[in-house]
Amino acid sequence: MTVDGGTKLSELDSKKKSASEALVNSFGGYPIGYGVGIVILPLSTGWIQEDPYMANLVITGVYATVSFVRSYFLRRIFEKYGIDDNFIRLGRKSIQKLIEKLS
């Protein structure tokens, strides 16, 4: 499959890069979702009892918006830095750069 300019899709997005990005997005989503839950659920307890359908729509919308923003932000990071290594190599490189800056 080719995209604009005749570039093959495999050149733009390798399987390792896709898997690494999906891993970061999945495991990064848990703490973010947990944090959103800690904030939004206590704020909506009274509202859930008064109007459960509308509260459900709003809470679902908040989670969907946070998920979209997280996915978009991570995608931009992967594209900006040309991350094509797997997540473990990326972690090692990040730690090495941090140690170099602190030394």
Image (tube, grey):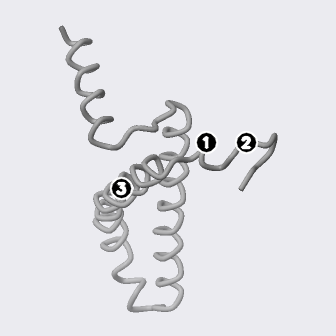
Give the residue drawn at x 46%, y 36%.
83
Q: Calculate the distance from the C-alpha at mark 1 to the C-alpha at mark 2.
A: 7 Å
- Say left or right for 26 vs 66: left
Q: CA distance from mark 2 to mark 3?
A: 26 Å
* Residue assigned mark 3: 23
Occupied quadrant, residue 50: bottom left
**Point 54% across, 60% down: residue:** 68
Chain-order first, disc 2 or disc 3: 2
Q: Earlier in the sequence, mark 1 or mark 3?
A: 1
Viewer-proximal residue among 88 and 63:
88
Q: Amino acid at mark 3?
A: Leu
Q: Is residue 68 left or right of residue 27?
A: right
Can you give x and y, in whole percent of width and height, for residue 95 in the image? 23, 27
Q: Secondary structure at mark 3?
A: helix
Q: Which residue is mark 1?
A: 11
Q: In screen coordinates, is 99 left or right of 56?
A: left
Disc assigned to residue 100:
none
Residue 94's spot in the image, x, y percent? Answer: 29, 28
| Cβ–Cβ under 8 Å for marks 1 and 3 | no
Looking at the rendered structure, the kind of residue marked 2 is Thr
